[in-house]
Every structure is written in C-alpha cells, then in structure tokens.
Image (cartoon, helix red, strand yellow):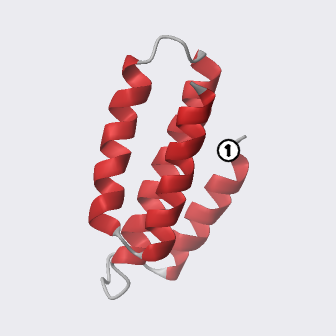
Amino acid sequence: MIDKITIRRFQLMLYYESGYFDELHSLIDSTKHFITNDNKTSAGAKNIFGNFLYFVKKFAEVKGNIKNKKYDEYYLINLKKSSAKKSFK
C-alpha cells in the first residue's frame, strides 16, 4: 500500500511541476477517495498524506492562477510557513 501512495505522491509532484493543473486536481480528488477507502494504511499515514494533498492543492491554486489578484505575497508566505510546520514524511 505504501508503494501505491508513493507512486501517487510522485504523480502529484510531476503534474504540479509540469503545470497540468486540471489533471492534478483530478488526481487529488481520486487520491482522497483512495486514502479514505483504504483499510490497510494507518491513521497516522493517512493524516500525513492528507496534509500533503491539502498543501499541493493550495500551492497549485496559487501557481495556476498567478495573475489572479486573490492570492497575494502575504498569502503565499503564510502558506509556506504553515506547510513547513506540517510533517509529510
């Protein structure tokens, strides 16, 4: 099960770095369902991966909408600070 999660994690990073935001959002959604329905993964691992999904989604919203006035530098700084406080490993 950990291998499946690792593969999805790499897929998420690849889509993010490549700028495939529609595919990224679809993969985030399917991964959330995958994790929710998985009985073999511990609650701690699910929580860590859930945090990872949350921040990937937030950073993708910022990166995908660079010209949108909704996200300013202050928002991005706070997002980086809060992601640094969470554990993803």
Count of numbered marks:
1
Q: Which residue extends farthest bottom? A: 67
Residue wearing tag 1: 86
Question: Relative to 55, is 50 above or below?
Answer: above
Query: Under tag 1, what secondary structure?
Result: loop
Question: Relative to 65, is 84 above or below?
Answer: above
Is residue 71 visible in the rendered image? The answer is: no
Amino acid on which the number 1 mark rests in the picture: Lys
Picture coordinates of residue 53, whole percent (x, y): 48, 46
Question: Relative to 26, is 63 above or below?
Answer: below
Picture coordinates of residue 11, whole percent (x, y): 49, 54
Q: For the point 67% across and 43% down, which residue is it?
A: 88
Q: Nearer the viewer, residue 67 or 31?
A: 31
* Quarter of the rendering occupied by the C terminus: top right
Q: Which residue extends farthest top? A: 39
Q: Quadrant of residue 57?
A: bottom left
Q: For the point 57% across and 29% down, which residue is it?
A: 47
Side (left or right) of 7 relative to 22: right
Q: Nearer the viewer, residue 70 or 55?
A: 55
Q: Quadrant of residue 60?
A: bottom left
Picture coordinates of residue 84, whole percent (x, y): 71, 55
Side (left or right) of 65 relative to 15: left
Q: Residues within 10 Å of mark 1 (few under 14, many from 20)?
A: few
Picture coordinates of residue 74, whole percent (x, y): 54, 75
Q: For the point 37% across and 47% down, which residue is it?
A: 28
Side (left or right) of 37 relative to 59: left
Is residue 80 visible in the rendered image? The answer is: yes
Question: Relative to 76, is 84 above or below?
Answer: above
* Quarter of the rendering occupied by the N terminus: top right
Q: Quadrant of residue 15?
A: bottom left
